Amino acid sequence: MASAAGLESRLGHAFQDARLLEQALTHSSYVNEHPEPSLVPNERLEFLGDAVLSLVISEALWDRHPDDAEGVLTARRAAIVSTRDLARIAARIQLGDYLRVGQGAERSGERNRRSVLASTFEAVVAAVYLDGGIEAARRLVLALCGPELERPMLPLALKPPKSRLQELAYQRAGRPPSYRVLSVEGPAHERRYEVDVALEGIVLGTGEGRSRRDAETEAAAMALATLADAETEAGSPDTDVLIPGADDAAGETSSSVGTTEPTDL
């Protein structure tokens, strides 16, 4: 695990209270293996960071895109605060290298899991907010999320990935895609779902998230990318499939782990 001091330079924020950064970088698996009173996992910071991120991103989008309607701004925000985008932002500063995880979680690759990276980034934002106030948090978010804030938004991005995938599935196969829950991990307050999606028996994408809905949405986004890649390789790219911010929210369905169930939206 890299030194937390190195992360401060990447964040552009020197912590007055180093314990906040330490907590933000402490995964629950580490606390489970080191039951010490001074160790606190980062879940509560994730909760706060989610709200701080939403505020700062909303304000920045409102300011930078004055001609966008509410629906477009909402779609932009949903894309940026999605697991996919937050994990990408976290990877740019190599956040996983600084995370403290348990040995079991280390072996299973938890440090580099997208949902974990996204949650840790939220926790770090909250830590900066508590340490330096909203201005410090704003500087951090604007500096690290700049590419996402300026990214062009295609009209198709306003439609959730699951809706778009279902339309493509009916066009190509005359039936909806099938989503299957592969695993459900963690305690009730910190569930993690892993899901795949298939069309005509062929798995096109997998996703993970804090809810089944989030996991299915990510799987649908990956499936759209897979289909787009296939079209490109075949020499007839379908640019409609390429959806920026493909983690927008979509409808949630239910099924048991290991079962396959078509989902109509």
Image (cartoon, rainbow, N blue to C red):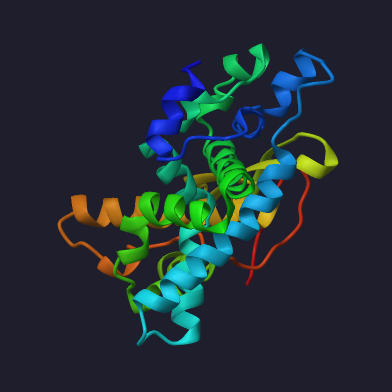
Kindly identify the residue that appears in the image at 31 percent across and 64 percent down: 151
Q: How many marks?
A: 0
Q: Position of residue 252 (x, y in %)?
A: 69, 63
Residue 16 occupies which quadrant of the picture?
A: top right
Kindly identify the residue that appears in the image at 34 percent across and 57 percent down: 146
Q: Residue furthest left?
A: 235
Kindly identify the residue that appears in the image at 56 percent across and 44 percent down: 128
Q: Position of residue 214 (x, y in %)?
A: 62, 54
Residue 121 occupies which quadrant of the picture?
A: top right
Instruction: Tell me if 3 is positioned left or right of 182 in this view.
Output: left
Seen from the viewer's position, the closer of residues 195 and 115 is: 115
Kindly identify the residue that appears in the image at 44 percent across and 87 percent down: 69
Vertical position of residue 62 compared to residue 238: above or below: below
Picture quarter with the C terminus: bottom right
Q: Position of residue 261 (x, y in %)?
A: 68, 55
Q: Residue furthest front?
A: 16
Residue 221 shows in the view: yes
Residue 243 shows in the view: no
Instruction: Tell me if 25 is positioned left or right of 199 in this view.
Output: right
Vertical position of residue 156 compared to residue 129: above or below: below
Q: Position of residue 251 (x, y in %)?
A: 65, 68
